[in-house]
Image: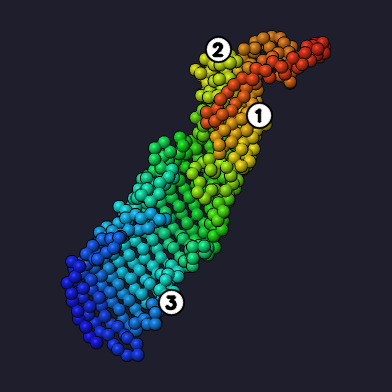
Amino acid sequence: MTHDINAEMLGGSLGIIGDLKMRSKMIADTTLKLKTIDLSSLDQLEKPVYGIVSADIKLKGPLPENGKVLTNGFKVDTAFDLENLSFPLDVKGKTVNAELGRLKGSTSLNKNRLQHDITAKLMGGNATIKGNLSLKETGLPDAVDTHLNLANIDLAWIQSIKKGDWIPTSGKLDSDLGIQGPLPKNPDSPIKIRAAGTITANKLILGTGEKKNTLESAIITLKDSSAELTKALIELTKIETAGLQFKKVQTNFKISPKQIDLTEGHIWPNNGQLDLVGTFQPPSGAYRLKFKGDKLKVEDFAKQLAGPLDLQGKLNGALPENGKGFPDIAKQLSGDIKLNLVDGNLPELGALEAILTILNPTSLLDAKKAGLNYEYLGGDLKIVKGLVNTENFEMKSSQLNMQVLGNADLGKDTVNAQIKVMPLQMLDNTIKAIPLLGQILTGGKKGGIIETYFKVDGKLSAPSVTPQAHRSLTEKPGAILNEIMNIPGNLTNDSK
């Protein structure tokens, strides 16, 4: 049956020309031509689709029957051009309006393979996808072998779908990526798709307001190692987050369906570097991380301090599925941290201002002008489910020595600790002139009359500091008496 049909419709035209042979199977050799069809002219329901469609669709071979979509010998070649396409898209229960300035390309369906070469103008940039898609007998996708190229994609549109501290509000995305492998059979099936190539984001701004984070560039390089393993290199440059600045971050990953291994990672702040290794298990969110610093400066991480920093430790926990920030992460955080700072300075006194006000107002004025110098500051921190404990955190300086015992709850932002302080500057000259007087005043190793206790509690972010005068007075006389009784022996030892 030879046919040549033309019709004016939907603001454009439809043409069908070719032959249809009626045998044991219907064999087609025909072409459908759509020209400038206006989709907005269709009788649409709740979610309208807009755009102009032109296409040539050529059908050749025995037509599918008995509910089958694919038939041996049946071929479909399509060339299409869609302009100003707009359609609703459901993303996690939220409907957003997807817009394509232009979608143009060609496809060829032969047996169970769909070849495609498609370009699109979308989100301020361009996208090209070229390759093959294997199909099941039902016509559903089975496996993919394609190449994706993105250029100058505007990431600001993501904010219309999801907002958050680490969701892009600005930035451009490019990619040169090969994608290959079987598609998951269902949502719970392991992902076995392999990717190789690069993904690049430039001038990234994540989040808004005070929690805004910025990156000059982010480059992900994927290497296709095997069906079960992909290697990835992530490089970030000029990062600013939470008031901190880093020159560069570089991490190497091995990615398998059940686990991601951080085989080597480096963070470069303004001074020194921090080395990392760890693991992450996507199904459970469990992670482990080890880190060690080299030639670090503490002011790169905490503006309230200055000086060399020796930092190392290990952390583990699980990322909450619907967490709302650091407090939820902290509740699952455990590990050990060793922190040592030497020959540094406290430009901002913080909670120490209350301590110095009580002990020596004069030294407070000096410390406010030049900061408080320290010879050593640090100790060991033990973390269990977000609760940080220390038994040996201390500070040594020419003005005072300080020891901290207690805990802080990172998830609840609370602190409950005791600080023992021994001010030194006001007695330095006297002790140097009369060493035995120094032993009496300090009570030897057990504490003396200038040893004072403070309680620190309330919010960890804004702690309250109060003196414990009863401890300072009641626990010292015995130690002082012992030192007085030891004077004869000390004099004898000194004479020798």
- Mark 1 vs mark 2, foreground winner is 1
> Which quarter of the picture shows residue 282?
bottom right
Along the line of sight, the residue nearer the viewer: 213 or 456: 456
- Res. 410 visible in picture: yes
- Res. 381 visible in picture: no
- Image x and y of residue 416, in percent: 61, 30
Task: Give, as a three-letter code, the residue at label 3.
Answer: Glu
- Image x and y of residue 244, in percent: 47, 36
Measure how far apart labels 1 and 3 are at the Cα level: 69 Å
* In this picture, residue 5 sits left or right of residue 168: left
**Mark 3 — residue?**
137
Q: Is residue 168 above or below residue 113?
A: above
Which circle marks residue 362 in the picture?
Answer: 2
- Mark 3 vs mark 2, foreground winner is 3
- Image x and y of residue 315, in percent: 60, 43
Secondary structure type for disc 2: helix
**Mark 1 — residue?**
405
Which circle marks residue 355 in the picture?
Answer: none
Q: How dense is the environment of label 1, judged by Cα within 10 Å: few (below 14), some, or many (20 and up)?
A: some
